[in-house]
Image: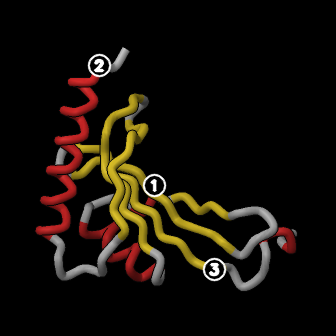
Amino acid sequence: MTTSTETTTGQIGAAGALLAILTAHRSLPTPSPELREISAAGTWAWGVRLSLHDGLDQFEQWRDALCLSPADVNHKHSYSSTLAWLIVTGTAYGVPIELVGYYDLPEPATTWA
């Protein structure tokens, strides 16, 4: 069972990592950051989720800067919608990192064969 102290310590570590990430990469496009529990290596831990909404080129810039492997990137989409995203999970700055890049498909996913 996770105690309040463990949760607070995990959140503080993730917050520190977020500050370090944003400071080290301030020349990159600004992401939407979020502290959350992330599953990495089979366990849940407090980490950082960075979401980008203005182009997959921004996702790639951040993926490269955080040294997240392109082989680990997964493509997801919302059924019957044009919403899609790339997502990759790894570790950076000592905490789990989840990087998400949203984009629009040219047509709803229901039309795919």
- Marks 1 & 3, CB-CB < 8 Å contact: no
- The amino acid type of the residue labelled 3 equals Asp
**Does residue 16 sit above or below 29 in this rendering?**
above
Q: Residue at x 85, y 69 (%)?
A: 110
Instruction: Find numbered disc 3 in the image and state the secondary structure of the residue it sits on.
Output: strand
Q: Residue at x 39, y 40 (%)?
A: 37
**Does residue 95 sit above or below 79 in this rendering?**
above
Q: Left or right of 77: which side holds 41?
A: left
**Residue where numbered disc 3 is placed:** 104
* Image location of residue 47, percent across then percent down: 31, 45
The label on residue 72 is 1
Q: Left or right of 95: which side holds 73?
A: right
Q: Quadrant of the N terminus?
A: top left
**Does residue 111 sit above or below 92 in this rendering?**
below
Instruction: Find numbered disc 1 in the image and state the secondary structure of the residue it sits on.
Output: helix
- The amino acid type of the residue labelled 1 equals Asp
- Closer to the camera: disc 3 or disc 2? 2
* Image location of residue 96, percent across then percent down: 31, 45
Q: Residue at x 30, y 81 (%)?
A: 29
- The amino acid type of the residue labelled 2 equals Thr
Cα distance, mark 1 to mark 2? Answer: 32 Å
The local crowd at label 2, few if under 14, some if 14 to 19, many if 20 or more residues have their Cα within 10 Å, is few
The label on residue 3 is 2
Quarter of the figure with residue 26: bottom left
| Nearer the observer, 71 or 54 | 54
- Marks 1 & 2, CB-CB < 8 Å contact: no
Q: How many marks?
A: 3
* Image location of residue 106, percent across then percent down: 72, 85
